[in-house]
Image (cartoon, grey):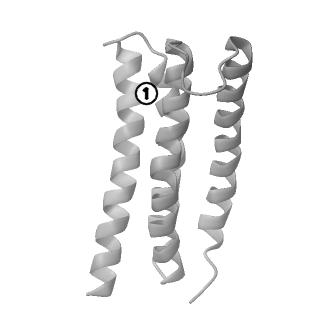
Amino acid sequence: MMFPATTAFYAALLALLYLGLSGWVMASRVSGNVLVGDGGDDVLLKRVRSHANFSEYVPLALILVGLLEAGGAGHGLVQGLLLALLVGRILHPVGMFAPPNSPRQYACRGGGILLTMATLGIAAIALLLRAA
């Protein structure tokens, strides 16, 4: 088994993005004097959900892709999956703040969701095929 260097690199980039999202939530909490929950603030709610959505999907995606890479999967597949994940996770919060039913909401939020789900699905299927 080899060290998953590409996954490690993208994990570091995603960790920095997570820190940015965390700071974004904290800034909104401080400015609105909200210590717990969203305080009924729609902006804070969207920030919290963007942050939470990231933390719900990224760890599993990194594990799956890291296992693929460590198991000797092709660099192109690993790189493509991780790039899709990174772009998806950048797009999603942008779409969360787009006007409802706008092209930007569909492209960014929807695109972010699709890229994340595609990463998870393709990585899972690739791992199952390698194990078979």
| Screen quadrant of the C terminus | bottom left
Q: Which residue is mark 1?
A: 108
As drawn, 89 above or below 40:
below
Report x, y in % for residue 93.
51, 28
Provide the secondary structure element on which disc 1 rests.
helix
Going by the numbered disc 1, the residue's amino acid type is Cys
- Name the side, left or right, on which 29 lies relative to 55: right
- Name the side, left or right, on which 34 lies relative to 55: right
As drawn, 131 above or below 105:
below
Q: Nearer the viewer, residue 27 or 60?
A: 27
Work out whether residue 111 can be spotted.
yes
Work out whether residue 84 can be spotted.
no
Q: How many marks?
A: 1
Residue drawn at x 28%, y 69% as measured from the top left: 125
Residue drawn at x 52%, y 51% as measured from the top left: 83
Q: Nearer the viewer, residue 116 or 35?
A: 35
- Name the side, left or right, on which 72 lies relative to 115: right
Q: Nearer the viewer, residue 45 or 126?
A: 45
Residue drawn at x 51%, y 39% as measured from the top left: 52
Residue drawn at x 31%, y 86% as measured from the top left: 131
Report x, y in % for residue 48.
54, 29
As drawn, 88 above or below 65:
above
As drawn, 79 above or below 51:
below
Report x, y in % for residue 91.
49, 32
Report x, y in % for residue 86.
54, 46
| Screen quadrant of the N terminus | bottom right
